[in-house]
Image (cartoon, coloured by chain):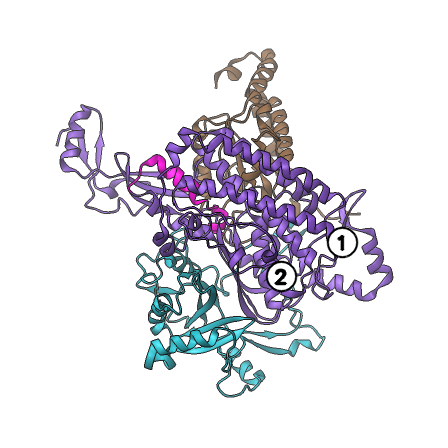
Chain colours: A purple, B cyan, C brown
């Protein structure tokens, strides 16, 4: 060994950010203090024990949240990729055990914050199954649920495509995609009051009816969203750099998807047209006219095309929802059973949004029962007969499952969410190993997981 | 917990033989979540149990699936399948842990069963169900036949070992790690059972019922609201 | 830092104005989006809300090139040391904006996993409540921060202000003892 390079034992160093890779006492380590680089390099090459571990740490502009990816690279090729998660673990599932069934909606909505409505719907479908009122949910409520879900689906795909483009250097992709998303937010905000993390979908229906002029507004905005999707497609799909970076990258065939439990657009890009909206319809999806886009290329490019096509299909569903909302004008949006239906009716008053004066007049002046129902439902919540259920819906990212256990009380005994991103992130290693470092970013973007859902 | 056993014996309603519920979820004492009041509801003891075993015919497609599974398991069927529960349109199979791998293999491989996807492991902790506190539920989805069932395994807190099914369903790798992290169920045969959500040096299994929520009191001007698990609340 | 320490007293005011104006001119935020608030922060960078009009659309990936750390989202116990490390890697002068209720106080999550407020880990200059705060609210908070930066005393004035603030904090009533305010 030259005097300029020393061989140190891995454990000689003081502060360690991570163990595992270099705790192996037999691993060679080289510290170079100057001298001729070619001598040191020859040294290392001769012993051929060069292990470079690159940490794409939790704080990274391209990791879709706080994800840590530990890459062992050899030159530009990745020999091993491991994902470290848990940096956004919020204990939402345990927290839900201390909140009533209705309050649980506000917690689960913040798991995968890009597709908040889907968590709400999955959870509420589970609660309704436990209560046995799945068929009693009024049709208008189901139409509103489908409307919210499809708008959120467009939003989620826009985030996926937009941030994916941004991470590869194309900021215009992100601005275009997010502007399309803003249009969906305009509709969502008009109906629910919030842009995101809305606690809109409650067990039994939805929190409040759509205001006047909503249908008109939706019809106005649909062509606008359509044109922005066209803009995005024009910007990306024939772009030579885009194609070079995405075609043939992050390939995962059907066998791989089945082994790793990968569902959603990634599974559909392998050729299997599996969509829970078609195979196990919920919320009235069987009555809507839409297609399920599929592809056979199973690479990152085909998944982007697939997601864009799904956005167009969602717009078709949104148009059908608007028509149905018009027909079902005046129908209730909550289940008829007053011991479950969320009692409050909100309205915009001089000091902001709160209980409408009509509702207050009704419960204070007209009906004692309504007052008792309101009081008991808001403070104690309704009780759910004991048992367990599993509900699964098709979220933009894949199959979102909810396991609910009730002990007969007003709060869940256990609520567990099977987030599609959790399984997809497992597949990251298989997509990255053998590829190049820059393709890790593409692989992460194409898997489209959100760390809030992964970590919960 | 002997308290729970005494109360169970006192308050349990006799069910027809063979249909006793296998899982005691909770023993609820008092009413409205309050104890020690003078309303008289304080002495109320209710035993909450999962719906008990269903009698044949189960209905829908459930009979076919259970028949095929029993045939494949052969002599071990009676021992392996502890109970079959059909509730709210869902089929739950309670499987003894020694036979879990075989059951998983049959569920995946047999052409009449073909449950290709295991939708993860959901752990549940029932502290009142002495001897079977920790449950691991595996929802299985069949794409070919478009149906779903649940496999549930129960183990004792003092011996929380369940064979890992990652050799049959590799997708369960991280799910089993998560269940180990949150409940302390040790999956034998898992390639790398380590904590995944909590920091590596965390002590305890957070989603168990005896683990506190860990919140801090919220300070207001002149008052303090305790953490959610210590407040007075309706249960 | 030399200029404000060595400026003669009559010039300190001018130096403060000049430096404050320059520093507030284009703060560069570090990408520190954690959860839902990060999506709203990204939306603020998009044309509808356009953070570029105040010069802040360049979210730096490396904290060494950033002035402002917008902690957007819930900070879990596992993430806390990394927040501190990123904050330490930022060069002075630096500011921290706690965006959203989770970063300000732990938010709706009062449990084992979340640090109840990022001010347990880093010193915070502006707290922005909301769950998540609308992009307009974020812009408002940033403009408040700009005002704060422009009015920052420097050098001797800063030391005096710090001493006064500390004395006031030591003499103040603790929140839990502030009783009788509703009368």
The x and y percentages for residue A418 are 48, 57
Distance of mark 2 from mark 1, alpha carbons? 19 Å
Query: Under tag 2, what secondary structure?
Result: loop
Q: Quadrant of residue C25?
A: top right
Segment colored magenta: A434-456
Tell me if I can see residue B197 in this picture: no
The residue mark sitting in front, 2 or 1, is 1
Q: Name the residue under label 1.
A: A345
In the depicted structure, whether residue B85 falls above or below residue A369: below
Q: Name the residue under label 2.
A: A101
Q: Main secondary structure of the magenta part?
A: helix
In the depicted structure, whether residue B205 falls above or below residue B46: above
Q: Is residue A145 left or right of residue C42?
A: right
For label 1, count other residues whose C-alpha is less than 10 Å away and answer few (under 14), some (14-19) or many (20+).
Answer: some
Mark 2 on the same chain as mark 1: yes
Was residue A438 drawn as part of the magenta stretch in this picture? yes
Please give the name of the residue rendered at 69% of the width and 54% of the height, measured from the top-left corner: A207
For label 2, count other residues whose C-alpha is less than 10 Å away and answer few (under 14), some (14-19) or many (20+).
Answer: many
In the depicted structure, whether residue C40 falls above or below residue C156: below
The x and y percentages for residue A156 are 54, 43
In the depicted structure, whether residue B224 falls above or below residue C66: below
Q: Which chain is mark 2 on?
A: A
The x and y percentages for residue A246 are 39, 36
Q: Which of marks 2 and 1 is nearer the N terminus?
A: 2
Q: Which chain is mark 1 on?
A: A
Please identify the residue farthest to the right as the structure is shown.
A365
């Amino acid at each position: 060994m030259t005097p300029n390079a020393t061989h140190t034992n891995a454990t000689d160093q003081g502060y360690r950010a991570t163990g595992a890779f270099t705790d192996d006492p037999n691993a060679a380590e080289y510290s170079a203090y100057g001298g001729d680089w070619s001598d040191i390099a020859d040294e290392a090459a001769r012993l051929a024990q060069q292990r470079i571990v690159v940490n794409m740490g939790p704080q990274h502009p391209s990791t879709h949240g706080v994800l840590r990816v530990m890459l062992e690279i050899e030159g530009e090729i990745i020999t091993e990729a491991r994902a470290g998660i848990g940096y956004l673990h919020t204990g939402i599932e345990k927290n839900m055990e201390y909140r009533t069934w209705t309050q649980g909606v506000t917690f689960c909505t913040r798991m995968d914050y890009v597709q908040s409505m889907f968590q709400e719907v999955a959870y509420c479908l589970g609660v309704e199954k436990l209560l046995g009122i799945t068929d009693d949910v009024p049709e208008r409520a189901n139409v509103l649920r489908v409307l919210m879900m499809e708008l959120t689906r467009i939003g989620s795909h826009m985030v996926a495509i937009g941030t994916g483009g941004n991470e590869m250097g194309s900021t215009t992709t992100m601005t275009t995609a997010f502007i399309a998303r803003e249009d969906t937010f305009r509709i969502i905000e008009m109906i629910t009051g919030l842009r995101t993390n809305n606690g809109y979908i409650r067990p039994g229906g939805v929190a409040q009816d759509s205001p006047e002029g909503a249908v008109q507004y939706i019809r106005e905005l649909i062509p606008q969203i359509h044109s922005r999707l066209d803009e995005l497609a024009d910007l990306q799909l024939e772009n030579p750099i885009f194609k070079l970076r995405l075609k043939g990258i992050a390939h995962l065939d059907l066998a791989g998807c089945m082994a790793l439990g990968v569902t959603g657009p990634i599974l559909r890009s392998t050729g299997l047209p599996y969509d829970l909206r078609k195979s196990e319809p919920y919320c009235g999806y069987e009555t809507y006219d839409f297609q399920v886009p599929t592809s056979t290329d199973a690479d990152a490019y085909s998944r982007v095309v697939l997601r864009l096509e799904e956005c167009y299909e969602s717009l078709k569903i949104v148009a059908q929802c608007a028509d149905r909302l018009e027909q079902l004008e005046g129908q209730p949006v909550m289940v008829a059973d007053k011991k479950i239906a969320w009692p409050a009716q909100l309205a915009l008053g001089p000091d902001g949004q709160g209980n409408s004066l009509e509702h207050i007049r009704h419960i204070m002046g007209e009906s004692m029962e309504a007052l008792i129902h309101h009081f008991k439902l808001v403070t104690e919540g309704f009780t759910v007969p004991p048992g367990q259920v599993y509900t699964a819906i098709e979220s933009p990212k894949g199959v979102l499952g909810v396991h609910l256990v009730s002990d007969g009380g007003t709060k869940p005994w256990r609520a567990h969410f099977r987030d599609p991103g959790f399984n997809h992130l497992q597949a990251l290693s298989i997509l990255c190993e053998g590829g190049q470092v820059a393709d890790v970013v593409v692989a992460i973007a194409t898997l489209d997981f959100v760390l809030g859902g992964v970590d919960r | 917990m002997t308290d729970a056993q005494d109360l169970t014996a006192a308050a349990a309603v006799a069910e027809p033989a063979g249909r006793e519920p296998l899982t005691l979820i909770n023993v609820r004492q008092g009413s409205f979540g309050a104890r020690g009041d003078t309303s008289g509801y304080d002495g109320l003891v209710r035993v909450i149990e999962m719906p008990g075993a269903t009698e044949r015919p189960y209905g829908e497609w459930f009979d076919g699936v259970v028949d095929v599974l029993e045939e494949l398991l052969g002599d071990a069927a009676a021992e392996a399948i502890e109970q079959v529960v059909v509730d709210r349109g869902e089929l739950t199979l309670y499987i003894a842990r020694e036979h879990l791998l075989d059951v998983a293999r049959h569920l995946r491989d047999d052409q009449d069963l073909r449950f290709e996807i295991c939708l993860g492991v959901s752990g549940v902790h029932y502290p009142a169900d002495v001897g079977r506190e920790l449950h691991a539920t595996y929802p299985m989805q069949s794409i070919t036949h478009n149906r779903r069932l649940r496999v549930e395994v129960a183990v004792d807190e003092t011996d929380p070992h369940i064979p890992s099914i990652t050799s049959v369903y590799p997708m369960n790798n991280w799910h089993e790690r998560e269940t180990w992290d949150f409940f302390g169920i040790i999956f034998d045969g898992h390639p790398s059972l380590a904590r995944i959500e909590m920091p590596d040096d965390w002590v305890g299994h957070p989603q168990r019922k005896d683990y506190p929520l860990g919140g801090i009191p919220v300070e207001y001007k002149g008052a303090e609201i305790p953490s959610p698990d210590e407040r007075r609340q309706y249960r | 830092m030399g200029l404000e320490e060595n400026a003669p007293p009559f010039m300190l005011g001018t130096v403060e104005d000049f430096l404050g104006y320059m520093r507030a001119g284009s703060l560069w935020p570090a990408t520190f989006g954690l959860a839902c608030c990060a999506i709203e922060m990204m939306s603020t960078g998009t044309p509808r809300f356009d953070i570029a009009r105040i010069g802040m659309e360049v979210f730096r990936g490396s904290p060494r090139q950033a002035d402002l750390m917008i902690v957007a989202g819930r900070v879990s116990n596992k993430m806390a040391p990394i927040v501190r490390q990123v904050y330490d890697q930022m060069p002075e002068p630096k500011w921290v904006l706690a965006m959203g209720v989770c970063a300000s106080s732990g938010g709706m999550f009062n449990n084992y996993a979340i640090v109840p407020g990022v001010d347990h880990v880093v010193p915070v200059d502006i707290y922005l409540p909301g769950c998540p705060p609308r992009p307009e609210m974020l812009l408002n908070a940033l403009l408040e921060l700009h005002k704060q930066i422009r009015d920052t005393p420097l050098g001797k004035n800063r030391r005096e202000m710090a001493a006064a603030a500390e004395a006031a904090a030591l003499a103040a009533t603790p929140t839990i003892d502030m009783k009788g305010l509703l009368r």
